[in-house]
Amino acid sequence: MKFAAIDIGSNGARLLISRVLLENSPNTNFTNKISFKDIEYVRYPLRLGIDVFELGKISKKKKAKLSKLMQAFKLLMDLYEVDDYMVLATSAFREAENGSEVAQQIRKKIGFEIEIIDGIKEAEILNHVIHQIPKENKNYLHIDVGGGSTELNLYRGKQIVASRSFRLGSIRNTEGEQSHEKKDDIREWIEEKKLLFNLAFETIAIGTGGSINKVYALINPPGNERMISDEEIITLRQYLKGFSIHDMVNVLKLNPDRADTIFPASEIYLSCMQWAGAHLMIVPKVGLKDGMMEIMLKRNMQKFLENPQKNDF
């Protein structure tokens, strides 16, 4: 069985196609172990947020690009003969005055049902993959920075005790008075929740999103723990200050849409860590698309278990 997850964000749009695997292993006492094998991944820098956060709508040029991209994704899905799919659109789409209209046009032309979700729903879907990380005796602040919004989940052990979405991202409100106001809102929320839930012992951050994965790759820490420190992020930010956008693209080999967002995004991650008193951040290689896979697995579980050999080809 194969699933396709499409995430239309404010900076980029992604397609992930994965196969569901069923293992019967003596190492797991002959119990069924279900996992995913990624078989196709495509990311395109659509950058809807550039239009929406300035003009309030998706422009004709972006609509044309979106339509072509969805057609390309549809062709790949047809080639792989996917059994189920989800298409989610986040911050830029939900705030565009013509977002619903564009979604209807895509549905009529291509057949995709685009679900426009709010920040709370986005955080809930991310929790499908993040909830496996926290341990019972620790506090965690999950930080997900997108182009148009930042989602925060505060965990006490494995339980979410508070969630909030903020209209601040790597594209939106990165400078000026609005930026300071939004950052103040985030700081006050974190400090209030820490006090409310008496989170006196150490908090560990969990960072998701394209920018923090690139930060992790640039830091390139030794080992396989997928963990970085606040000091390492500070050092990297000092290093990046010596590069222009042009140099980030040509010397550091960053994609243009990452080169101009990595600095504001890393500031949000670092600030949240400092306000929460977190000195370490886990950077799992997961995102919204992985949460979507878990949802599709749940709604197709019975069908999959009845015919797991469908994967063989």
Image (cartoon, rainbow, N blue to C red):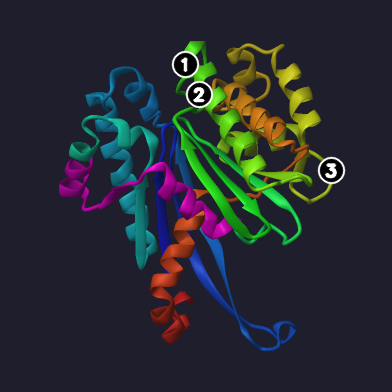
| Residue 234 part of the magenta segment | no
Question: Which residue position is annotated with label 1?
Answer: 178
Residue 182 marker: 2
Tell me the amino acid under the disc marked 3: Pro
Question: Which residue position is annotated with label 3?
Answer: 222
Q: Residue at x 84, y 43 (%)?
A: 222
Local crowd size for mark 1, using a 10 Å CA cut-off: few (<14), some (14–19), many (≥20): few
Tell me the amino acid under the disc marked 2: Lys
Q: Image check: 277 left or right of 179? A: right
Q: Which of disc 1 and disc 3 is earlier in sequence?
A: 1
Q: Image check: 52 left or right of 296? A: left
Q: Residue at x 58, y 27 (%)?
A: 265
- Quarter-wise, where is residue 81 in the image? bottom left
Check if mark 1's residue and mark 2's residue have beta carbons within 8 Å.
yes
Residue 170 place in picture, x, y as percent: 52, 26
Check if mark 2's residue and mark 3's residue have beta carbons within 8 Å.
no
Our reading of the magenta stretch's main secondary structure is helix
Check if mark 3's residue and mark 1's residue have beta carbons within 8 Å.
no
In the image, residue 91 sits, relative to residue 249, either above or below, namely: below
Magenta region, residue range = 103-130
Local crowd size for mark 3, using a 10 Å CA cut-off: few (<14), some (14–19), many (≥20): few
For the question of whether residue 40 can be seen, the reply is no
**What secondary structure is marked by label 3?**
loop
Tell me the amino acid under the disc marked 1: Gln
Measured Cα–Cα span from mark 3 to mark 1: 38 Å
| Residue 106 part of the magenta segment | yes
Residue 275 place in picture, x, y as percent: 68, 31
